[in-house]
Image (cartoon, helix red, strand yellow):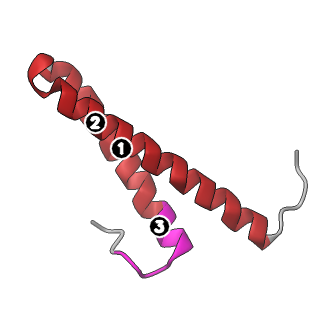
Amino acid sequence: MTGVVDSDELVRRIQRARARAAHEERLWRTRSAELERADPAEKGVADMHRLAYEAVLRVLDEILTPGKSDVRG
């Protein structure tokens, strides 16, 4: 598994990773909203997951389109 990867394949892999991170962020955002009243402690856990995926999205966006967004927050 140490084969050489060309730049097009690398971009495709980053795009797939970004799509997955966006999907996960939406799932955790939904979960957080569902838990808002039912279980505040678990809502906090869901929020941490959502924030982690948001950070991943920002980094991958910066890799795919440098300078488009402010990665510093």
Question: Can you give x and y, in whole percent of width and height, for residue 47 in the image?
Answer: 25, 36
The number of callouts visible is 3
The residue that appears at 27% across and 66% down in the rendered structure is 73
Dots 2, 1 in contact, CB < 8 A: yes
Q: In the displayed orientation, state which residue is furthest to the left.
A: 37
Which disc is residue 30 wearing?
A: 2
Q: Is residue 11 magenta?
A: no
Q: Quadrant of the N terminus?
A: top right
Q: From what the image shows, is residue 35 above or below residue 61?
A: above
Q: Which residue is mark 3?
A: 61
Query: What is the quadrant of residue 30 in the picture?
Result: top left
Q: CA distance from mark 1 to mark 3?
A: 16 Å
Query: What is the quadrant of residue 63 in the picture?
Result: bottom right
- Say whether residue 47 is left or right of residue 61: left
Looking at the rendering, the stretch of residues picked out in magenta corresponds to 60-69
Q: Secondary structure at mark 3?
A: helix
